[in-house]
Amino acid sequence: MSNASPVKFGNANSGSTRDDALFLKVFAGEVITSFDRASKTQGADMVRSISNGKSASFPVMGRIGAEYHAVGAEILGSAVNSAEKVITINDLLISSVFISNIEEAKNHWDVRSAYSTEMGRALSFQKDKHILQTIGQATLASANVTSGDATTNVVNTGIASSTDATAANAMIDAIFAAAKELDANYVPSEGRKCFMRLEEYYKLANATNAVNVDFSGGANGGVASGKVAKIAGIELVPVPHFVSSNITTALPDAGSATNGGTKPQAVNLTNFVALVSHPSAVGTVKLMDLAVEKEYDIRRQGTLMVAKYSMGHGVLRPEAAVGIKEAA
């Protein structure tokens, strides 16, 4: 018996190489957008909002000493070193898209909602990088005032070991050393975070000293979850966009503040694998919060959508941040 010759309803004029060419493409009901590059630095800085102006000033006061009083001697008062930290607003940072009428009409899904979300994510992602780079600046900054406090970055070459266990143990030692630096400067333990590269984080998640129940009681993560919560009381935050390079002039990463000095977020973080900081280390001055606006352009027959914000970042307390490096 010979094979049947079925009618190929989907073949265009029986000449197409595809038998499904005429079949309808059914909308799945979900738009595949980029994965959400979630912010990693929420709560990592001190935020101050201003309603006008280009910058904000933060007074800095040094420590006051104590002394014994000699009988009959006049008390004149102790000298106190002081200064100020000024954070200048960066230029307006934007993300935009133009949607033509005809293209929007052809689409069977809500393009505006998807693009609005993506623009917001783009700005949030850039803010994240700027805060991390500013923390990096804090680890390299000198004391705010004469004889003031500052930290020394931790260098542990064992972190670069090709043996995961050796690298993980070296990272644990480095985080403890960073905690010691912060303790020495009386930085509060509450709110400390360690932003680190993914490579080092997942080595820690597989390290006995970090996740073994004999050391942590089982509450600090484990191999099964692939997570480790804290080391030396410091919350660990893995950062896919951790910067381990020299950011000099590339925009928008280096920042731009034409009226207050160019490239305010430029920093050399070569060989850095982690940044340990307290929220008091860096500050954010916010003039215009994240907002999205749109306007129809009749001349171009489409809608322009713009997401924007205006804020600046700067070092406040360098003694509240420590860098961890795998090489000097």
Image (cartoon, helix red, strand yellow):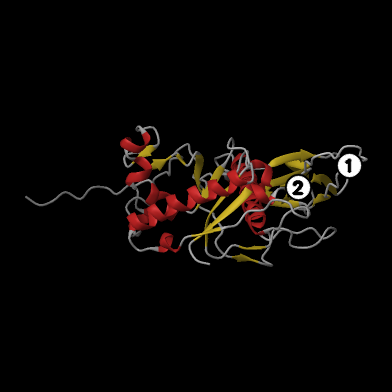
Q: Is residue 226 visible?
A: no
Provide residue 264's location: percent of width, then percent of height: 74, 59
Residue toward you, 157 or 149: 149
Kindly state the secondary structure of the residue where label 2 is placed.
strand
User: According to the image, label 1 marks what residue?
Assistant: 77
Provide residue 193's location: percent of width, then percent of height: 55, 43
The amino acid type found where label 1 is placed reads Gly
Distance between the alpha carbons at the discs numbered 2 and 1: 40 Å
Provide residue 304's location: percent of width, then percent of height: 73, 48
x 62%, y 50%: residue:
321
Residue toward you, 15 or 313: 313
- As drawn, the residue found furthest toward the front would be 71
The amino acid type found where label 2 is placed reads Met
Q: Is residue 250 above or below residue 304?
A: below
Q: What crowding class fits label 1: few (fewer than 14 Cα within 10 Å), some (14-19), or many (20 or more)?
A: few
Residue toward you, 68 or 57: 68
User: According to the image, label 2 marks what residue?
Assistant: 311
